[in-house]
Amino acid sequence: MANIEKIKCLIIGSGPAGYTAAIYASRANLNPVLYQGEQPGGQLTTTNEVENFPGYPEGVMGTEMMMQLEQQAKRFGTDIRNGWVTKVDFSTHPHKVWVDDQELHADAVIIATGASAKYLGLPSEQHYLQTGGGVSACAVCDGFFYRNQHVAIVGAGDSACEEALYLSKICKKVTMIVRRDTFRASKIMETRVRNTENIDILFNSETEEILGDGQLVSAIKVRNNLTQELTEIPITGFFVAIGHKPNTDIFAPYLSLDKDGYIQNVPGTSRTNVEGVFVAGDAADKHYRQAVVAAGSGAIAALDAERYLASLEH
């Protein structure tokens, strides 16, 4: 049998939560090993400019900020590796984790695998998401860039309504695109949206294409799914609010997840239902989904892991 590497503190994921956990864990001499996963830097690398993270008065590019966090973790000795976890076995201790089919054993595991925004999947949507020219899945992050402009948002649930209301305070006009003839949102949220003057709701409508000059968005083509009529609406920002999927599938056999797949932590801590397994960031957070919150939860996870590892030694 091949030699199995034994790790004191394993961190899975490399967004603000994973890197902050690594900074704290390495400064506590836990010798953390961090696997970056398939999207090194996490969701922040898909955002253009981050203006709401404290300490960056001029704002910072998402990718640049993640590189800085990575360097900070490395400075204190974190072993940062490429590769992603394909399987786990949390039924015994030490915990077993497979990275690209190679087995590792870890005393403490910090899960910081994040969540992925769901997109419509249109080629034009993906194009303008890449250019950073007008497609976003986070109104709180990017709404400010579209102040006094006309934007559209797609979605029908509570978070779509919440984002539409947020945008209505910043933007001149918000067009809300709802696929069916009703909202999925709670009545109170629906009422707020309907009572907001500058929100225009299009029911039975689907986005056909996002139009622009190749760099910046200038309009969308919307199809009425009852009449098949196509309408072109001039906008500069297109927000997608059709939900997020936490990247937690491989943990489902061992960890308590809620109905949407988010890992359930013991309130006020990063602890899960398995001793020695901790969670940080958007894999457990369906409410806030902000980089600064994820970073804070990464610190909590490292501190909880440190206390747990200390208890094993005594």
Image (cartoon, rainbow, N blue to C red):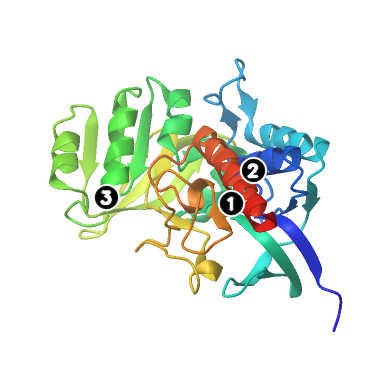
Q: Helix, strand, or loop for circle 1? A: loop
Residue 52: image tag: none
Look at discs 3 and 1 and give the one toward the viewer.
1
* Residue that numbered label 2 is attached to: 21
Residue 59, position in %: x, y?
Answer: 60, 21
- Label 3, label 1: how far apart the Cα atoms are: 28 Å
Asked whether residue 236 appears in the rendered view, the answer is no
Amino acid at circle 3? Ala
Q: Are marks 2 and 1 in contact (CB under 8 Å)?
A: yes
Residue 38 vs 191, above or below: the answer is: below
Q: Nearer the viewer, mark 2 or mark 3?
A: 2
Amino acid at circle 1: Ala
Say whether disc 2 or disc 1 marks the residue closer to the N-terminus: 2
Which marked residue is nearer to the observer: mark 2 or mark 1? 2
Residue nearest the viewer, comparing 110 with 56: 110
Q: Position of residue 244 (x, y in %)?
A: 43, 53
Along the horizontal axis of the image, is 53 left or right of 243?
A: right
- Which quadrant would residue 105 be assigned to in this image? bottom right
Q: Is residue 246 left or right of residue 39?
A: left
Vertical position of residue 78 compared to residue 53: above or below: below
Q: Residue at x 61, y 50 (%)?
A: 305
Q: Which mark is residue 112?
A: 1
Q: Position of residue 178 (x, y in %)?
A: 26, 50
Q: Residues within 10 Å of mark 3 (few under 14, many from 20)?
A: many
Using a 10 Å C-alpha cutoff, classify the residue at mark 1 as few (fewer than 14 neighbours), some (14 to 19) or many (20 or more): many
Q: Residues within 10 Å of mark 2 (few under 14, many from 20)?
A: many
Instruction: Tell me, for residue 156, which label it has, or none.
Output: 3
Please identify the quadrant where the N terminus is shown. Answer: bottom right
Query: What residue appears at the point 36 percent right and 28 percent down from the top-left corner?
Result: 150
